[in-house]
Amino acid sequence: MFATIHADHNFMAKNIGFQNSAGAIKHQAVALLVQCDQAVFYNCQMDGYQDNLYSLSHCQFYRDCTILSTVDFIFAQGRKELKDASGFVLQNCVISGAQDYLPVKGRIKTYLGRPWEQFSRTLIMQSQLDDIIRPEGWMPWNLNMYLDTLWYAEFGNRGPGTGRRPDQ
């Protein structure tokens, strides 16, 4: 099931799963697209192939969620204006590989995500990052595009996928 959450504001999902089973043949396979301000996801699971969780815009909070993917886990936050009061937070989540990815994890580079817009803002904190995540954590978009304007932070994460990034 692929889901698009589009509401003005104040959406909450609890104890539910979102899955896109299109896999590598269909390439980008978003499981959950969220376009809602003040969206909260609690104890939910997102399963997809590439760009699994597409956090399009506004403020979104994910707590105790599991995100299983293959290439990019988070199609990260589409903040277009510097003064836009928006961002994306994952707290106490598990980020790991999908079952079909685990046998080939050494051959395909996997990242937490990459910037989608110029002022993208994302925080992953107190979460479990499995060993499938590259030591760099985040992948630049189109060479160095947006690297001087985005804000990505990781704080207090655990697991072998945390690498040695300086902002943890």
Image: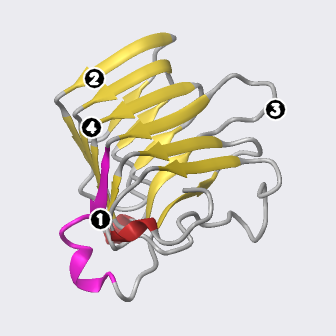
Residue appearing at x 27%, y 40% in the figure:
65
Front in this rendered view, residue 151 or 1:
151
Residue count near mark 1 (Cα–Cα under 10 Å), binned few <14, some 14–19, many ≥20: some
In magenta stretch: residue 97: yes
Identify whether 58 is placed above or below 106. above
User: Horizontally, is 55 left or right of 106 in the view?
Assistant: right
Q: Amino acid at mark 4?
A: Asp
Q: Position of residue 71 (x, y in %)?
A: 42, 68
Instruction: Please name the residue shown 67% across and 65% down the image.
Output: 140
Alpha-carbon span between mark 2 and mark 3 = 29 Å
Q: Is residue 142 left or right of residue 37?
A: right
Going from N to C along the chain, the mark reached first, 4 or 2, is 2
Residue of label 2: 13
Residue ID for mark 1: 23
Residue linked to disc 4: 64
**Category of crowding for the residue at label 2, using alpha-carbon neighbours closer than 10 angstroms: few (below 14), some (14–19), many (at least 20):** some
Q: Which residue is mark 3?
A: 82
Q: Are marks 1 and 4 in contact (CB under 8 Å)?
A: no
Tell me if residue 15 comes above or below residue 68 in the rendering.
above
Q: Residue at x 38, y 88 (%)?
A: 107
User: Mark 2 belongs to which amino acid?
Assistant: Ala
The amino acid type of the residue labelled 3 equals Leu
Q: Which residues are magenta?
A: 93-105
